[in-house]
Image (spheres, rainbow, N blue to C red):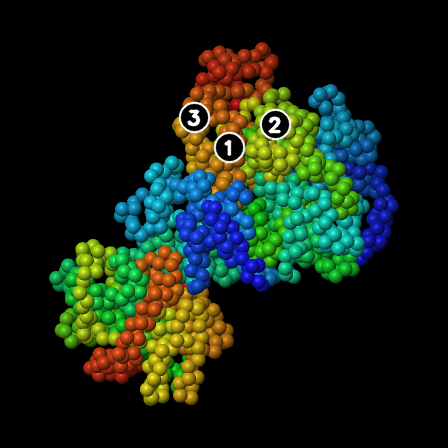
Amino acid sequence: MKSDILDMSNLCKNKLSELDDYIASLEGNKQEQLIHVLHKAQGLFGYLPHNLQLYVARALDLPAAKVNGVVTFYSYFTEKPTGKNVICVCMGTACYVKGAQKVLDEVLKQTNSKKNDISPDGLFTVKEVRCIGACGLAPVMTVNDKVYGNVDEREIADIISKFKGGHNEN
Amino acid sequence: MKLIEKMVSCTINGIHVNVEKGTTILQAAKKIGIHIPTLCHLDLHDIGIVNKSANCRVCVVEDENKNALVPSCSEVVRDGMKIQTDSLKAVMGRRTSLELLLSNHPRDCLTCVKNLDCELQALAHEMNIREIHYKGEKMSHPIDNTSFAIIKDSNKCIMCRRCVTMCNEVQTVGVLNPLKRGFDVVVATAFHLDLNDTSCTYCGQCVSVCPTGALAERNHSSMVWRALNDPTKHVVVQIAPAVRVAIGEEFGYEPGEVSTGKIVASLKRMGFDQVFDTNFGADLTIIEEATEFVHRLENNGRLPMLTSCCPAWVQFIEHQFPELLDVPSTCQSPHIMVGSLIKTYYAEKNKIEPKDIVSVSVMPCVAKKAEVSREELTHNDLSDVDYVITTRELSRMIKEAAIDFKQLKDQNFDELLGESTGAATIFGATGGVVEAATRTAYEMITGKELKEVNFKQFRGLQGIREAEVQIGDKTLRVGIAHELGNARKLLEEIRDGKSHFDIIEIMACPGGCIGGGGQPYHHGDINILKKRAQALYDLDEKMEKRKSHENEMVVKLYEDFLGQPGNHKAHELLHTFYSAKPRI
Amino acid sequence: MKISSLATLDKWRDELRAAVKFDIKIMVCSGTSCISSESDLIFGLLKQKIDDHQLEHQIALVPTGCQRLCGQGPMITIEPGNITYFRVKVEDVEELFNEHILNGRVLYRLLYVDPKSGESIQDFAKMDFYRKQQRVALRNCGEIDPKSIDDYIRRDGYKALGNCISVLSPKEVVEIVKASGLRGRGGGGFPTGVKWEMTAKSRGNEKYLICNADEGDPGAFMDRSIIEGDPHSLVEAMTIAGYATGANSGIVYIRAEYASSIPPLKKAIEDAKANGFLGNNIFDSDFSFDISIKLGAGAFVCGEETALIHSMEGNRGEPTKKPPFPSESGFRGKPTTVNNVETLVNTPPIIINGAKWFRTFGTEKSPGTKVFALAGNIRNIGLVEVPMGTTFREVIFDIGGGHPLGKKIKAVQIGGPSGGVITEAFFDTPIEYDTLTKIGAMMGSGGMIVMDEDTDMVKIAKFYLEFTQDESCGKCTPCRIGTKRMFEILDRLVKMEGSPADLERLETLGKAIKTTSLCGLGQSAPNPVLSTMKYFREEYEGYAYRTKKIAYSINGEKCIGCTKCARVCPVQCIQGALRDVHFIDESKCIACGACYKACPVNAIVKP
């Protein structure tokens, strides 16, 4: 297990050097900007695998446990790779009272996945989000960057099917 | 400031009390004899250890002016405060917090390592909890029993964060940290790595402050029992200096009670074939270390030289400062020296096959459990020491063997590796090693007799201490640090080329070995540590011989077996080397 | 150009106002809801049209911030005449442009139809939704181009800052804000002036002003709308607060989820810097101030100021005990003021118009206005800014237009997961900090969720608790384990596996968590449960005694009256004439689901 984490060879060199440049460009106390660095790292790699967290820890001279503690505290950071399509179901209150729970259940069913886990076919990751500020369209879900408003649970199969079978819209 | 301006007054349960500004409600209540239960709270501010996270909510009391509950451990008394510690609201608040903790805690108290020594259990008893009203999901984390030193069972964790404070703020090792959040929060290593795969130093300070059984030493007593009951094995034991001034606490003695003779007696009763003294190894260490130091000093060697008796400290430098591995002395820790000699010198003298010897060390230390598994501390494929048991484990074994400790008649160590001087005794307290080394180095360098052997400037509990000693025409600059966070500061100075010391003593644990991770739990009472240290200095004071090189059995060892200090054979048996390790 | 005095600012403003005016101004709402309904595409098409007809000198096309009636978006407002079109679709652009712009005729079919009179309304100011609103915080939102500093200057932008620095001492600024009675809009309602004064009086040269833009209350989006729709007002307000408290560094802590809010804010900061409203020697004084942005990463608890500060320092966002307050020891251990977005943007108008003016709105103890995000089972979903003291009834029925289908409104949840429910009995209560606290709710950040008679309050309570439990930092015992236990009890109840004893347990535990938790999140986490238990106990008992009926229902908006459901119902509990909306008699329904399968238009709602 240990060797997996110490091995950084599966991390793209170019991305790492972009991350290095970003860290070098930070002004002031760099450790204080851990969250920004993690945002950058997640932006580059899509998620924060353990060896990348260790890489960040060393770059900022922080204990790895601290970095891992921060990563696992905030819901925005993910340690797992995401599916080809990321579906976010808004579970803000406005959406909830308009049936977001049913939307979420249906989306999980249709994608055959569990919350925050990549679906077996690798096509989807379904996440719950807290209010995307589109309460006027409740209930709302997004697939990648596209927003679907006033979603009815029975339309979901149609929406999802567009992203199955290779013809990905985005 | 006038005295009156520095004081504030409040009432607690209707009793008026004046206290200095900045006093907590808990302290004020204590002053007037009102007890408030606490759990996460830990205050050893004399040695820089304070956990006032106010998160367990077991110490809440009612602030009547605000009509609210406040945590007494960290809420500071303000003028005119009206505090009620026993109102229904306060009591119910505290009970609910405790019940909630218990609702998420395994009920295996009977077999738990902390049974009858557990702060959570004690509180449940004290608060007369007879039923837990809230039931539901409990944590289920795998137990980490991969390390030789520490077992981590997070299911027993109550998130007091004392270990996090110790590991991060005090020791600056940073291995333990809370991960995740909400109900799923868990104090863990990065990525839930096994402790063995991290930069854990095994100092055991997390263990020594853990209020429950979430962090405990790995129990080696069953292996020791097995050896004792194996007729083909010759079982030899040694005990460290700090053990003798602490173990009494487990048997109802006051802290600082010296029970060397009773320990020896009980070990013999348990069936150990020989009982030796790690203090012998301490004297030997001084000879070797002083020789090395004088050599470095006189040959423009790497200075400062750092002592190397503390295995947690050695782990620390290997992981955290791999570029400084030429700085510590190459001397093994004293019990390893004794261990090497048991399987060579003693074995030869008594014509015992080294492989038939089982060598056990009784230590105040958790890190020594991991130390004995180090590959470089073996000779001919045999570990220098086979098992390390802590002071606590020994006390449990004595009880298990139904030995009435208090009734035992004192007995003496066995001769060959049993003699020691006062210099060895003070190894157990921070500053003791360098004091002992100075006593010998002085005479080595000057060839004159040292009249005043007490170096009081080396003693005390300040985190970093420095002193100068005149040795002939040389001014020796001595640094002392206990707790690894303080050590880090001195190491950074060395790394940056700013250190002005010639020799530095470092001990990982607060107060040195007397505050070791394997000692009886101090439960946050600093006086216990102080009394243990004082007992060691008192012992030293009473000894006839107080310089290591006066130890006759050590002299004999060199004459009969080793030859000259620092020579090839001594190096092979008594010295070691260090290797860089990753920082995780 | 660096503006060095009030006079140069006045001159610039006059020039801008006098500059060429366009004949027509088309304002396309670019709030989140409208963008989600493709208002960005509509904007692009309009731009294309204008270019095609070479009308770029006659027509100003402006992407504005939120125009507030989000439920009816995308919205386009055209001046002159303040004519607002609703629910504009991409395919409407052609007709809209031809009719309104080229032919000068109003396109009636896209106007708002008043539900009461059935009449189309041209001027949005005459709509009930807008008529009763009073805008202070949202004064520019939806009417200016957020990316244009000129637009902001035209509307007296940076005048308040100029006044503060050129005319007033920091102490006087604090006094004005104190006198205005402005209270924190993000939570407990602590007086802003007093907060500023505490930091101003703290010793030390290094101080910080933090804008809390970590709008975590699900269902509230006013702060986002302000940042995206009027970012300069925030920049100006922060600079004023910095001047008053003695801080030279301002930091906006913003939710990572609000990625689209960052560019407009960054642009505003840059433009303010370029014009001398930020940076060194602002208005030629010795006051210097700068603003940077820090990203959150998704933690509701970071709305709590100590947690927010820890997060800004790169740590887990765990709260710590107060005192010490941030005003003594905050960011980097230095005196720090933490204000939320809405609070801050109230201050420039207060400086310009005076504390007395501000007090003409609202009530004695809660002066000014408050923005609410109105959502749930209500006709007009959107942002609503009303004077404090307005009653719930006015907001729900006059502004919100009541239930879209005329169903009974059962309760309003205010204050998000930390708040409580208000029942009909309290609909005439004036909305202000202290009255809300008295009836078991709290202002919070201003999410206002309307629930109709079909809403299951136990499930709502469970929803909120699941949220707080999920968002608990896990530091203190009551919040970490207590909310989990409460959630487990609710879960049991809802699954019909609970018992009457659970109700007592729930209540006792809820009260204990309120009193023993470390921070505001834990202290308020039981509110939704306790307040629903208080007002809807019978619903809890229905679950606890397992007497609750579980029934299907029909969504009247979708039902086409085909009678298929009634025909398959085995207990004949569905009524309704052909082509009329059908109803299910819930007391008879056995929840078999036959109607659900039979319905061709998905109008049947599962229990």
> What is the secondary structure assignment of the residue under circle 3?
helix
Query: What chain letter is assigned to the residue under label 3?
Result: C
- Dot 2 and dot 3 within a common chain: yes
**Residue at horizontal 23%, vertical 75%?**
B419
> What is the secondary structure assignment of the residue under circle 1?
helix
Looking at the rendered image, the quarter that the N terminus of chain B falls into is bottom right
> Which residue type carries mark 2?
Phe
Against A134, residue B231 (above or below) is below
Q: Earlier in the sequence, mark 2 or mark 3?
A: 2
Alpha-carbon span between mark 1 and mark 3: 16 Å
Do the numbered discs 2 and 3 sit on residues whose CB atoms are within 8 Å? no
> What is the secondary structure assignment of the residue under circle 2?
helix
Do the numbered discs 1 and 2 sit on residues whose CB atoms are within 8 Å? no
Question: Is C265 placed left or right of C556 in the picture?
Answer: right
- Percent across and percent down for residue A157 are 52, 31
Q: Which residue is mark 2?
A: C426
- Percent across and percent down for residue B242 are 30, 67
Q: Which residue is mark 3?
A: C544
Q: Which residue is mark 1?
A: C530
Q: Residues within 10 Å of mark 1 (few under 14, many from 20)?
A: many
